[in-house]
Amino acid sequence: MKRALPALFLLIMLAGSVSAAGVSYYPDKEAFMKFLDSNLTYQIVPGNDPWSKGWAIYVDEKLSRIKGHGNDTIVLVGNVYTNDLIAEVWNQTGLDPSASLTPSIIVLNDTVLITGSSENLYLTYEPFVGIKMNSVKIAITIMGVVYVILMMIILKRDGSYAGSMFLMGSLLLGEWALLEPLSAPFLSKTLYLSLARLNGAPTNDVSIVVVSHILEILPPDEVLFWAVRWLLVFFLLGATTYTAHRRERSLGIVAFFLVLSAPLFRKWLLTSNEILGLLSFAVVVAIVCSSNFAPSSSGVASVLMMSLFTVLGMVFNPYLVFLPLVFLVVFPGRTTRNASYLLLSAIGILLIYLSLGNSWVSPWHPDELNSKVLIDIVREGLLQLVVLVYVGARMIARRNDIKIRRKGPTVFVGTVTVILLLLTPIESGLLPYSLFSLSILAARLIRTSPQI
């Protein structure tokens, strides 16, 4: 088993970041870099639209790390149609006014113009990405190391080698994080849209709403959000570990790297703002697979945690509303427990809808049947399907010795997987969830025993 994890990781082709269109500099980039390196103070004046106001917050955050506020240089953000001060000095550039709608950084005598339209202003992030907060990187790294150590200690308590496997998996993830380039275009656009939303720009993207609330606490920095994203990936590894059988937690780690072998899943993991939704889904499955839901057990703490993460998952993916229903069918023994889970989830749904309205469900409206998605499921989930075929063949060969349960965690995971696979062809956004659930099912079925 210890050899399986590196072998799986070798199957992973690291996906590179997507290049964005370059920003234009006038008279040249060196002039702006000279401004950054100087001791000149600055003040920022944004345009009157939410996009330039939001981006001015980003620029101010970056410049404030290397410069002081003052009146030496005026930094204008927007274009000639949204910022009156840009319109006043635009003739000094010798450019057509429409040129202010392209992402540009223009250095005049005592004025710096950062221009662009609402669609492309964020592309001026290029010279600011290098202005980083080293303290943030150190803090996130320390949090990650502490988390890995704690997980190792907890997993080693059962006497298995799951703790060692978790360390190996964490090191492999760490290597990937070091090799993977910073996805600056994606992160900058996310920050741009979120800051614009804080200043009144309309949006139907729930993830942007969530990030905008986070930006009320944290500074708009690509490296910070990149580090947080990787920390969530490590948390996802930990949650997946607990989706396996209690004495076989290492199979949960195998499940994680099974799904990580899918190129589309890796790309989604680093370029989607819905990773918190998948993490919540993984936590719910982990609780189901690790808790005692026998009729004699109340499971109050487990139900409360499941309700919390079910609601959090539904914020990003309304289709997760079926989780309480599947739980009710698979674990029918305790009426009070099941009713509590359903009630708490229903209250969560109501609160989400009151807060987000139709923007919550509209992006997830079912499409027509997409046969390409079926091909993606087979191609991306090939390893998982091979494992399932192997286990199925073993079950057929030993059908007289194997008793298949009608209840329990494996039935729950299997039912959820079937539902996701049926829904994915009409809602392609469920593909990462389907691949993830399929991997968990495959890993649980690897441990073929007299009872499955």
Image (cartoon, grey):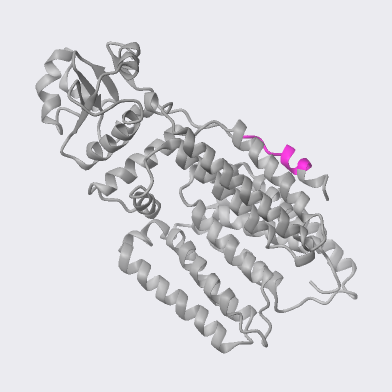
Judge left or right: residue 120 versus residue 108.
Answer: right
Question: Magenta stretch: residue 9 in it?
Answer: yes
- Residue 375 in sight in this render: no
Q: Quadrant of residue 255?
A: bottom right
Question: Magenta stretch: residue 42 in it?
Answer: no
Q: Quadrant of residue 396?
A: bottom right
Question: Which residue is at a point 67% across and 87% down the rendered structure image?
Answer: 295
Residue 378: x and y in percent read 66, 50
Is 233 rendered above or below residue 157?
Answer: above
Nearer to the camera, 219 or 422: 219
Question: Which residue is at a point 77% across and 58% down the rendered structure image?
Answer: 156
Q: Which residues are magenta?
A: 6-14
Nearer to the camera, 276 or 264: 276
Judge left or right: residue 207 versus residue 259.
Answer: left
Nearer to the camera, 67 or 425: 67
- Residue 198 in sight in this render: yes
Is 212 rendered above or below residue 351?
Answer: above
Number of numbered tags placed on the structure image = 0
Residue 325: x and y in percent read 54, 76
Is 103 rendered above or below residue 1?
Answer: above
Question: Which residue is at a point 57% across and 41% down the rendered structure image?
Answer: 141
Judge left or right: residue 117 versus residue 150.
Answer: left
Quadrant containing the C terminus in the rendered view: bottom right
Nearer to the camera, 422 or 443: 443
Judge left or right: residue 357 versus residue 324.
Answer: left
Residue 265: x and y in percent read 59, 46
Residue 261: x and y in percent read 68, 44
